[in-house]
Amino acid sequence: MKAKYERVMIKLSGEALAGDQGFGINPSTVKDICTSIKSVYDLGVEISIVVGGGNFWRGRQSDEMDKSTADYMGMLATVLNALALQDSLEGMGIPVRVQTAIEMREIAEPYIKRKAVRHLEKNRIVIFAAGTGNPFFTTDTTAALRAAEIDANIILLAKNVDAVYDSDPNINPDAKKYSHLSYLDVINRGLKVMDSTAITLCMDNHIPILVFGLNDPKNILRAISGEKIGTLINGDKNE
Ligand code: GTP
């Protein structure tokens, strides 16, 4: 199998790491995800990863909490997930570097763009943790920002649904599945793919996004090989 992309950004939701238990880290789920990432790595693709933190903490869980504080807690949650992914990937013999947007040097190296690129060139997987380091930004925005900085060819947005639909397919059995959308379609139709900051960052920097389901971990490999799965979002006009 040949890879269609040279350098990719994989965005994983924190929930994806929790498996059926719905909270925290499920080691066998993490192992399954890392096994599929390894299959992509073995093709020679340069891989960067941003992981969310929703399996530990989801934004502000009460109105009484200060929004910035809640967001900083979320950033710390992403560090837990990044270290779990690093541990699992390294267990498979893959060199991995975690870089954090908030300095915590005893735990991981700080985010330095030029060092991240160098790691990728040396076939190390780079995991970007602690979001952008700023409250009010999501990990989707982190994925878009880092993808732009390191010149990734595409963002692979692994979700708990297999594509983008015009309404929730779990509620509406007639929900229409999109195979292609433009950035503006996503914004104008209010489709809940990424938040608007993340999607406009991708639009302005011409970074395509492939949304696909992680229910079958082999989908990452399918996505990399250019198989038509999920929903592709780019600057082309809608079909
Ligand atoms: P090259 O210089 O390209 O060979 O990269 P390298 O990452 O192998 O070398 P470096 O000497 O920078 O790092 C060696 C190890 O220390 C790697 O596992 C890094 O992730 C880790 N490391 C580097 N800087 C820091 C840091 O500030 N904090 C922590 N905790 N680890 C670091």
Image (cartoon, grey):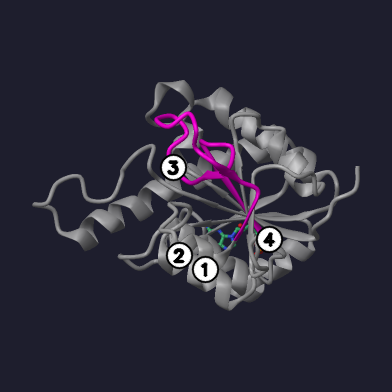
On screen, residue 75 versus residue 228, left or right, reads left
Magenta residue check for 164: yes
Residue type at tag 2: Ile
Toward which corner of the image does residue 137 lie, by quadrant? bottom left
Q: CA distance from mark 1 to mark 4?
A: 17 Å
Which circle, 1 or 4, is nearer the viewer?
Answer: 1
Residue type at tag 4: Ile
**Label 4 SS:** strand
Tags 2 and 1 touching, CB below 8 Å: yes
**Label 2 SS:** helix
Marks 3 and 1, the one that precedes in the sequence: 3
**How busy is the neighbourhood of tag 2: few (under 14 within 10 Å), some, or many (20 plus)?**
some
Q: Which residue is mark 2?
A: 187
**Label 1 SS:** helix
Q: Which residue is mark 1?
A: 184
Marks 1 and 4, the one that precedes in the sequence: 4
Q: Which residue is mark 4?
A: 154
Q: Is residue 74 above or below residue 235?
A: above
Q: Quadrant of the N terminus?
A: top right
Asked if one can make out residue 9 in the rendered structure from this viewpoint, the answer is: yes
Q: CA distance from mark 3 to mark 1?
A: 17 Å
Q: CA distance from mark 3 to mark 4?
A: 25 Å
Asked if one can make out residue 105 in the rendered structure from this viewpoint, the answer is: no
Q: CA distance from mark 2 to mark 1?
A: 5 Å
Q: Quadrant of the C terminus?
A: bottom right
Magenta stretch in the rendered image: 155-181
Residue type at tag 1: Leu
Q: CA distance from mark 2 to mark 4?
A: 19 Å
Q: Which residue is mark 3?
A: 167
In the foreground, 62 or 116: 62
